[in-house]
Image (cartoon, grey):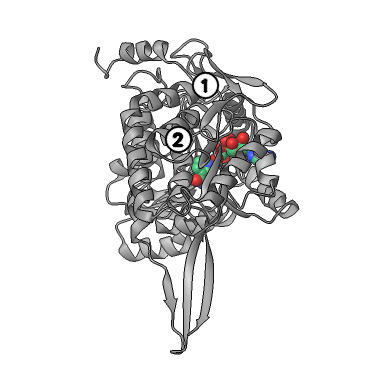
Amino acid sequence: MEKSTLAYWQAQASELVIEGRAFINGAYTDAIAEQTFDCISPIDSRHLANIACCQSEDADVAVAAARAVFEQGSWSKLAPVKRKATLLKFADIIEQHQHELALLETLDMGKPISDAIHVDLAGTLRCIRWSAEAIDKVYDQVAPTASDDLGLVTHEPCGVVAAIVPWNFPLQMACWKLGPALAMGNSVVLKPSEKSPLTAIKLAALAIEAGIPAGVFNVLPGFGHEVGKALALHNDVDTLVFTGSTAVAKQLFVYAGQSNMKRVWTEAGGKSPNIIFADAPNLDDAAQAAAGAFCFNQGEVCTAGTRLLIEESIKDEFIEKVIAAVKSWQPGNPLDPNTNVGAIVDRAQFERVLSYIEKGKIQGAKLRCGGNATAPVADGFYIEPTVFDEVDNAMDIAQDEIFGSVLSVITFKTMAEAIAIANDTPYGLAAGIWTSNLSKAHQMSKAVRAGSVWVNQWDGGDMTAPFGGFKQSGNGRDKSLHAFSKYTEIKATWMKI
Ligand code: NAD
């Protein structure tokens, strides 16, 4: 059967054997309290698996295993070139299982199978390979000293890293942490989102198959306020890395302060402006990109371009182009390879998105398209991409991160006004700027407070570029060599010769 058919993926899905246990010290294990929770697919509400519901006692066991192997040194003290070879093998094994992993991702959180393969798995592989390749190319430093001293500046692994990740790109977000953390020799305890634990659970067994020693990579499925909180408060976790909402990110700093002052690095929310000037090089391309910017991954993207700022003189023309482009982003069966919009991750998120659509109407924004739940598959959670015009930046739909395909169109007259609106948000994750004027592009790029700025495109960049936020979108950076600094402590050794 062709991999490019719905029937193929439905058949694969019906044959899948899904693992739901935690993975600690090299083996699958039930939660100590033997509790589980249901894993339900948003595609059609089918029951996928019973998932181990880990608690603080499971965190204690996993952290102890991670610490023991770190001290023993079979990974942390390994020659970089050997860690590199093992991580490259890990990537090869992930690639061998990429279709199974992609299918698990689609079933678990509802994204289109094509995206799971071509975006999530491709990005995961690139991240692990890039991190592995970097290991034996990163040098330490010798300080400039008098001739009777030797000053060494060296980077050492932090020790035990806890990684808490979200559900929108479950495997890829996990690997943005895992790649550099393992590359630098740390042990990792990963807590996937309770809404999307399946790929993380599978990944752990592949790590063992690749030769990563038992205890170096552990996975604890469970709820944030239970096992997530336990890891964040744990006195033997050295570094906590997180991707998720700003509200939880803030809480993690509190937990670190209440416990051992572990290092905390967060990638949090966003409400990114996509700014269209009348002199954009090609308005058709800009409109296509503007539609993709808020429809891709059901709008469940931290960098989603959910505030579309249009220069007043082209507003009417441009919004028509965007509405036309949105017609090609309509929900379908996520298992169909032709689908580009899948299911919303679960009922709670589905209801949250619909409630914001209602708020937009009540607060006076003009609904231009979408706005309804739809049902390409019975018993699933699907919403039409929704465009609101005449939005004031103070409205809830323009201020809050909805995490669904709801676009707020706002107009501006001058560059100064565009900058003021773009920055009038607690977030600072990303921004798009469309103009043919090079000076304007540079001025805007400097003025907009965001970790990623894209000029005449949306979502540019790859593993070579750092990713993260200004303001309440987080601290620290994922991807690129900048990410590596989160996973090491710097030591200065000063020797008298
Ligand atoms: P969330 O903050 O609700 O959950 C993220 C993770 O934190 C989950 O694993 C959850 O179980 C855990 N958690 C929740 N409460 C916790 C607590 N008290 N202690 C410890 N852990 C806890 O976010 P989400 O709904 O899973 O994901 C959506 C959010 O993620 C959005 O805000 C989105 O912008 C953000 N996100 C950011 C980026 C980025 O790189 N900046 C990327 C993807 C998603």
The residue that appears at 42% across and 68% down in the rendered structure is 140
Question: Which badge, 1 or 2, comes first in the chain's sequence?
Answer: 2
- Whether 476 is drawn above or below 284: the answer is below
> Horizontally, is 209 left or right of 357 in the view?
left
Amino acid type, callout 2 = Leu
Q: Position of residue 459 (x, y in %)?
A: 38, 46
Q: Position of residue 377 (x, y in %)?
A: 45, 12
Amino acid type, callout 1 = Asn
Picture quarter with ligand 1: top right
The residue that appears at 37% across and 44% down in the rendered structure is 87
Q: Nearer the viewer, residue 29 or 427?
A: 29
Q: Which residue is mark 2?
A: 171
Q: Is mark 1 within 8 Å of ligand 1?
A: no
Q: Is mark 2 within 8 Å of ligand 1?
A: no
The residue that appears at 52% across and 29% down in the rendered structure is 27
User: Of all residues shown, which one is farthest toward the left?
Assistant: 2
The local secondary structure at tag 1 comes to loop
Q: Quadrant of residue 12?
A: top left
Q: Callout 2: 10 Å neighbours few (<14), some, many (20+)? A: many
Q: Which residue is mark 1?
A: 372
- Whether 173 is drawn above or below 433: the answer is above
